[in-house]
Amino acid sequence: MTWAEHAAGAPSKGAPAGWSRRRAWRWGAGRLKETRAFTGDATLESEVLLRSAAAISREEFFTRPEAALSPAAVAAYSVLIARRAAGAPTAYLVGHREFFGLDLAVDGRVLIPRPETECLVEAVVGALRRRRDPLVVDIGTGSGAIAIALARALPHAQLLATDISCAALDVARKNAERCGVGHRITWQAGPGLEPLRRSMAEGRVDALACNPPYIPSDAVAALAEEVRGWEPRIALDGGPDGHDLHRTIAAGAGRYLAAGGMLAMEVAALWDQAHVVAGLIAAAGAFGPARVIRDSAGAERVVVAERNSSCGDRRG
């Protein structure tokens, strides 16, 4: 009898619970590898889905790989594998994603946090580690990943996190509460820098971080199905050249940053985005030379610059 027949409850002399964790894991990995559109790590993702279906930790999974699965876990796992093979992202299927050591809830209202974005968090933490009571802004917070990671890494910081999507802010707010930093983050809905204007933050911000939508509109259709078909387009599409929000922030951030404050924006490794964003920052006239930071894979990932002290510090 096939695994699918077991999951469907078809009659059999062998009970579904007779399947071991290891056997189920191998079956799930094989099923994903056979899926033409699947581009992930089948071994890892089938493990994650199996642990979610069986409600067990990674330690428990590898400590007792031959333990039998219950019929309920068999059925749940079969459904998860089928949905993953159909394109649904693993993070949405299990309902969470790890980022910077945090376990964050995610669903279709928010972009799934990527490991590459940890480079942006590290840059801001490095700049503010010794600064007293910094004010940090996260534009386009999504799941809250950047703001929450910064709040945890900078225990004396206060944060303002914004998003154009009220639904995303709901996810972010709940994540912050779960991570114990909700009381230190203010949430504001609105596009671009508009929430900062309403917050009267001129000249007071020590760091402004942003992982904007940066995929050129024409390139969205070429993204993997699990991205273009499931993640919010508003969090992916950066306009005709991918720089709509980069351009807005580079032009206006100087108004809100304190002297010596940091602007940090994530960019795509493709389309020469780091060079373009550095040029946008230079054209704003409020910053020193931009610097490009590479991620752990060596790709250009973050562009940072400090606000010129010659512009005057409006901190009051």
Image: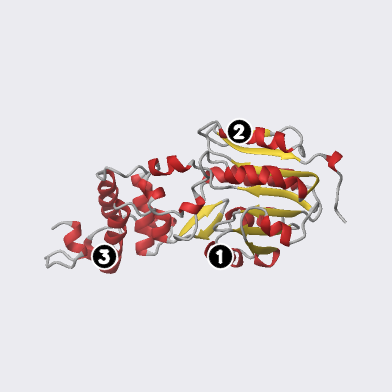
Residue 86: horizontal and vertical position, in percent?
29, 53
94 left or right, relative to 212:
left
Q: How far apart are labels 2 and 1 at the CA level? A: 30 Å
Badge 2 density bin: few <14, some 14–19, many ≥20, Cα 10 Å: some
Badge 3 density bin: few <14, some 14–19, many ≥20, Cα 10 Å: many
Seen at 43% across and 44% down, the residue is 220
User: Mark 2–mark 3 contact, CB under 8 Å?
Assistant: no
Q: Secondary structure at mark 3?
A: helix
Residue annotated with mark 3: 75
Residue annotated with mark 1: 166
For the residue pair 146 and 169, the one nearer the viewer reads as 169
Q: Quadrant of residue 51?
A: bottom left
Q: Secondary structure at mark 1?
A: helix
Seen at 53% across and 45% down, the residue is 238
Q: Amino acid at mark 2?
A: Val
Q: How far apart are labels 2 and 3 at the CA level? A: 50 Å
Seen at 29% across and 51% down, the residue is 85
Q: Is residue 48 above or below residue 183?
A: above
29 left or right, relative to 314:
left
Q: Amino acid at mark 3?
A: Ala
